[in-house]
């Protein structure tokens, strides 16, 4: 970035910070004037949000394609557009029941005719710091539970997706009163200021390192935070689980957003006797179904050149440390930043791709002697956002689930726990804290008020 560009960015951020403070004060004042919206008001907001996603469907497709250089329209529809609208519908269908006071038992011997209940009360003004990989699904999606809980919301889109950020601002500006829902976009300085405000709740989605900084900044005001941070999600393939459907699930998950997804399969654990068979089956699947993967218009590009270089550095480091690379799906497309899928054999724990969340189309393969050894390997690392076990034996699946801890898990599938609006989504430890989606998301953004 040149000196002039830095000066322009600084000036832009100053304006964005001023706008943020104005919107924050506006929403704080509005919340004090009307702290508890009724069911009808909340349903109207959810309906407006769902309609906003559907009306702007084509614009969403175009913005994603502009920022990623290449992005499948069908996936934009399925996840970033219809997924958000469907999530709003799910919440709307259940909201009346969620808002009811929960009666609790009060000992009549001590409290006579007294009654006890718990009521979910709006927290107030909630901030959402959105990531670049799912600009609408995670940028706008969590606002559903935030609004359902009766809050007011300010969204900060990622500066790495400028087209999506600008569209987010336009959509929200054209749909909502800024005293209810607003968005503000900017660069690094805005990102630094955003978590320092006295939010009633703050959500951040992104890397563990930045998440730590956000949590520290929010802690100065004792602001409760929801952190969605990702991690290294393993796919554990038991010996009886290696079949074409398993391969389809793992490759299908890994190629979503070209691996740029926090719940994607980060590495595969395969029995020592089946490693070569696993590689052969993945190769055959790619040759049969995605032979031109990196040339396809429906393959997502890596978000920018810096991340492309980061991923290449992981491969170079692995090669230098003795790994064997198996490149599948064509050659690198530099112009569109579309990378082929690369399997990494003989991956060791001192390699960069085993020390960091990969966030790209690279799949290291680790081997194990028995299921207990595979479980021990998972447990030796940080607790992941998701664990995916593939087996035809219920006892093996139960053993993996009982002996590991993760934000979510799937049996004979991958990442679907994050796509279902009825399941809470979130991590544990360095993969995050707190939950959004569904009833648990409604509770996350509510103050559970005890009343006697």
Image (cartoon, grey):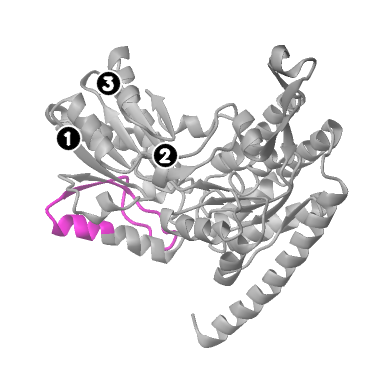
Q: Are marks 3 and 2 in contact (CB under 8 Å)?
A: no
Give the Cα separation between the discs numbered 1 and 3. Answer: 14 Å
Residue at 67% across / 59% down in the picture?
198
Q: Mark 1 or mark 2, which has the lower sequence index?
A: 1
**Marks 1, 2: nearer the viewer:** 2
Q: Mark 1 or mark 3, which has the lower sequence index?
A: 3
**Residue 385, disc:** 2
**Marks 3, 2: nearer the viewer:** 2
Q: Mark 3 or mark 2, which has the lower sequence index?
A: 3
Residue at 17% across / 35% down in the picture?
367
Give the Cα separation between the discs numbered 3 and 2. Answer: 22 Å
Give percent across and percent down for residue 436: 58, 38
**Residue 235, disc:** none
Residue at disc 3, secondary structure: helix
* 30 left or right of 67 in image: right
**Residue 367, disc:** 1
The answer to whether residue 393 of the structure is visible from this angle is: no
Give percent across and percent down for residue 51: 76, 39
- 437 and 443: which one is in front? 443
Give percent across and percent down for residue 443: 64, 34
**Marks 1, 3: nearer the viewer:** 1
Q: Which residues are magenta?
A: 314-342
- 172 and 32: which one is in front? 32
The answer to whether residue 288 of the structure is visible from this angle is: yes
Asked if residue 316 is among those painted magenta in the image, a careful observer would answer yes
């Amino acid at each position: 970035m040149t000196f002039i560009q830095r000066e322009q960015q600084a000036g832009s951020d100053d304006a964005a910070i001023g706008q943020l403070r104005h919107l924050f004060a506006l929403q704080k004042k509005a919340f004090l004037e009307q702290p508890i919206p009724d069911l009808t008001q909340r349903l109207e907001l959810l309906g407006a949000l769902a309609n906003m996603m559907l009306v702007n469907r084509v614009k969403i497709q175009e913005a994603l394609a502009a920022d990623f250089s290449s992005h499948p329209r069908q996936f934009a529809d399925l996840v970033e557009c219809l997924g958000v609208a469907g999530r709003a519908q799910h919440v709307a269908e259940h909201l009346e029941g969620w808002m009811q006071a929960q009666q609790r038992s009060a000992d009549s011997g001590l409290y006579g005719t007294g009654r006890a209940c718990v009521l979910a009360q709006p927290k107030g003004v909630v901030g959402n710091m959105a990531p670049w990989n799912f600009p609408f699904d995670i940028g706008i999606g969590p606002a559903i539970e935030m609004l359902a809980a009766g809050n007011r919301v300010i969204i900060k889109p990622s500066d790495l997706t400028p087209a999506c950020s600008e569209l987010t601002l336009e959509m929200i500006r054209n749909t909502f009163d800024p005293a209810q829902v607003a968005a503000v976009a900017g660069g690094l300085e805005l990102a630094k200021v955003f978590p320092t405000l006295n939010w009633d709740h703050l959500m951040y989605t992104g890397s563990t390192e930045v998440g730590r900084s956000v949590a520290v900044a929010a802690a100065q005001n004792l602001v409760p935070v929801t952190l969605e941070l990702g991690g290294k999600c393993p796919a554990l393939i038991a010996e009886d689980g290696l079949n074409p459907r398993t391969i389809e699930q793992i490759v299908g998950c890994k190629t979503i957003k070209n691996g740029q997804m926090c719940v994607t399969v980060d590495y595969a654990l395969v029995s020592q006797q089946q490693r070569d068979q696993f590689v052969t089956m993945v190769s055959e699947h790619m040759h049969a179904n995605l032979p031109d993967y990196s040339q396809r218009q429906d393959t997502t590009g890596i978000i920018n050149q810096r991340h492309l270089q980061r991923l290449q550095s992981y491969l170079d480091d692995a090669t230098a440390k003795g790994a064997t690379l198996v490149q599948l799906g064509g050659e690198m497309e530099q112009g569109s930043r579309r990378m082929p899928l690369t399997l990494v054999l003989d991956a060791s724990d001192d390699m960069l791709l085993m020390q960091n969340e990969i966030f790209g189309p690279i799949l290291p393969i680790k081997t194990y002697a028995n299921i207990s050894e595979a479980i021990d390997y998972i447990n030796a690392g940080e607790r992941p956002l998701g664990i995916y076990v593939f087996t035809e034996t219920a006892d093996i699946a139960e053993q993996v689930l009982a002996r590991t801890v993760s934000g979510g898990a799937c049996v004979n599938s991958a990442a679907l726990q994050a796509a279902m609006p009825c399941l809470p989504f979130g991590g544990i430890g360095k993969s995050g804290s707190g939950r959004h989606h569904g009833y648990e998301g409604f509770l996350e953004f509510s103050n559970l008020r005890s009343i006697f």
